[in-house]
Image (cartoon, rainbow, N blue to C red):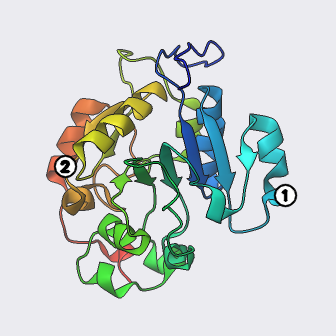
Amino acid sequence: MRRTRPVAHSRYRTIEREPMKIGIIGAGAIGGTLTRRLTALGHEVAVANSRDPETLAELAAETGATAVWAKDAAAEAELVIVSIPQKAVPDLAPGILAARRDGAPVIETNNYYPQQRDGLIERIEQGTTESDWVAEQLGAPVVKVFNTIWWKRLLENGVPAGTPGRIALPLAGDDAAAKQVVSALVDDLGFDPVDAGTLAESWRQHPGTPVYGKDFDAEKTETALAEASTERTAEWRA
C-alpha cells in the first residue's frame, strides 16, 4: 500500500490523503485539465484519447502522466474518469472499465449537445438522464460531476476550503461510498462539492439548467439545483 504523503507542489492546498491511481479516458478540455490538476496533486494518472498514445506525448511530458491506449486506461485504477463526447460513448470497447479495481468509482463529465455536436440520442430525448444513459453504455455505475464548469475555471480557480465565494460543483450518483471519494477529490481540487442527489436527479445539472456554466458558491448552487426543470430548453433539444 502506498503511504499517505503531503503534496507540497499543489498551488491549491496541501493534501494528506493517499494518492490514487487514476485512469482518464478523454484528453479534451476537461480531461486534459483534470490530467494537469490531478498530477499536480500527486496522483498517478494514465490518460488516453481515441488515438495512438503518442498523440499525447506533449501532455504526458508536461504533467508526468502516462499516455496509454483507451483500452488500458482503467487497468488497476482506483478511480476512472470518462470525459468524451456523448455520441462517442457507445464506441468505447466493451468492458473497458472491467480492469479497474473493485469498487473504483467512475466519474463521467459528459454533456449531451444534440444540435451542436452529438446528434439525436433517442433514449435521452425520451427522458433518460444523460448519466443513466452513459452508465448503461459503460455497464457500470457512474458519478456525474465536472460537467457544469468551464475548463479554464477548473484549471485556474480552485481555492482552499473556506475561501469566500469558493466555486461549488454539483455531483450526482447512486453509490454513497463513490460519492464520498469523488467529493473529497473535488474538495482537493479547490471546489466545494454539492450533493445533487441520485443519478435519476442528475437532470438538475444538465445543459440549460440554472446551475450549468455558472460559478456559484455552495448556497447558490443548492438553490439553482432546486429551481431546475426537467423540461429541456429549445437550445438543448434535438
Image quarter of the C terminus: bottom left
Q: Is residue 169 above or below residue 208?
A: above
Residue 32 screen position, x and y as percent: 65, 48
* Circle 2: residue type: Gly
- What residue do we see at 19% from left, 67% from top? 230
Distance from the alpha carbon under mark 2 to that under mark 1:
39 Å
| Residue 135 can be seen in this image | yes
Q: Where is residue 162, by image quadrant?
A: top left
Q: Residue at x 29, y 71 (%)?
A: 233
Q: Position of residue 153 (x, y in %)?
A: 53, 38
- Height in image: 196 above or below 135? above
Callout 1 secondary element: helix
Q: Circle 2: is it few (<14), some (14-19), or many (20+) Cα within 10 Å?
A: some
Q: Nearer the viewer, residue 221 or 73?
A: 73
Question: Contact, CB < 8 Å: mark 2 with mark 1?
Answer: no
- Quadrant of res 7: top right
Q: Which residue is mark 1?
A: 54
Q: Which mark is residue 119?
A: none
Residue linked to disc 2: 197
The answer to whether residue 47 is left or right of residue 140 is: right
Residue 216 seen anywhere in this rendered image of the structure: no
74 to the left or right of 232:
right
Closer to the camera in the image, 169 or 107: 107
Q: Earlier in the sequence, mark 2 or mark 1?
A: 1
